[in-house]
Image: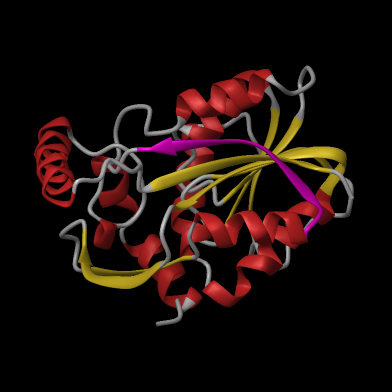
Amino acid sequence: MRVNKDDVRRGYDDLAPVYAEQRTGDGDGTDILAEFLGSLSASPRVLDAGCGQGTPILSRLASEAEPVGLDFSRGQLSRAAENVPNAPVLQGDMTTLPFESNTFDAVVAYWSLIHVPMDDHQTVIDEFARVLRPGGHVLLCEGSDEWAGENPDWLESGVRMEWNIAGADETRTQLQNAGFDVTDTWGAPETLNPDEGDGEDVDAEDADAETEAEDANDEDEGEDSDPWTFFAARLVS
């Protein structure tokens, strides 16, 4: 299936209050974000592409960088403006970023590329390369395996959500096609079931139950692979 971007946008608008209540804590990958930010020059200008409600990523960027938040959901952007009032946010589509070329030192895309239609992933990564300054950096996450699906009642909110996940191998190729050199990768555990979407934290009790189920599944399959992959890459051409 191909993600319908209008459905995703409306979904995030409609579930903004529920999403804010159910997404708690620092979220998976904030330690990776800290390491990534530590590798950048002082006070870098950073685009948070798909900033959502502004936590935990945009809020962390605001304390260590000069961030700009971008999202196509007005409902999420309203929350971001409240949560991170010192960071500018604007509505836009990652396939046609509303910025001039050579604007940012870094781009961060957490749990956002997975909501873009599969055949637009390369376009988005090309746009990241365009708005970056020479030698700029990108940090993004993708599912380790290709997957596409939907959930008609995501977060038990009555809201339908859709995902297109290209997988780690294809994402690495797309980064290279856009002129990036992949400098580091990290695996990250699942905190949501695949049909529930991104990897931000849920309530501790739910997360523990999901972890137990995943551990049991790993034992059955004889595997211990991470379902999410984070990529850090530098623009070299």
Name the dominant secondary structure of the magenta segment.
strand
Relative vertical location of residue 236 with respect to residue 165 in this rendering, above or below: above
Whether residue 180 is in magenta: the answer is yes
Q: What is the x, y in percent for residue 155?
A: 21, 56
Farthest bottom residue? 1
Residue drawn at x 57%, y 32% as measured from the top left = 85
Question: Which x, y percent locates residue 82?
Answer: 48, 37
In this view, 228 is above or below 169: above
Residue drawn at the location 57% of the way across and 62% of the way down: 170
Q: Is residue 127 left or right of residue 168?
A: right
**Residue in the picture at 62% in, 27% down:** 36
Magenta span of residues: 178-188
The residue located at (51%, 34%) in the rendering is 57
Q: Out of 118 and 8, give the one closest to the viewer.
A: 118
Could you tell me residue 9's position as x and y percent? 46, 68
| The image quarter in which residue 11 lies | bottom left
In the image, 220 versus 43, the foreground residue is 220
Magenta stretch containing residue 213, yes or no? no
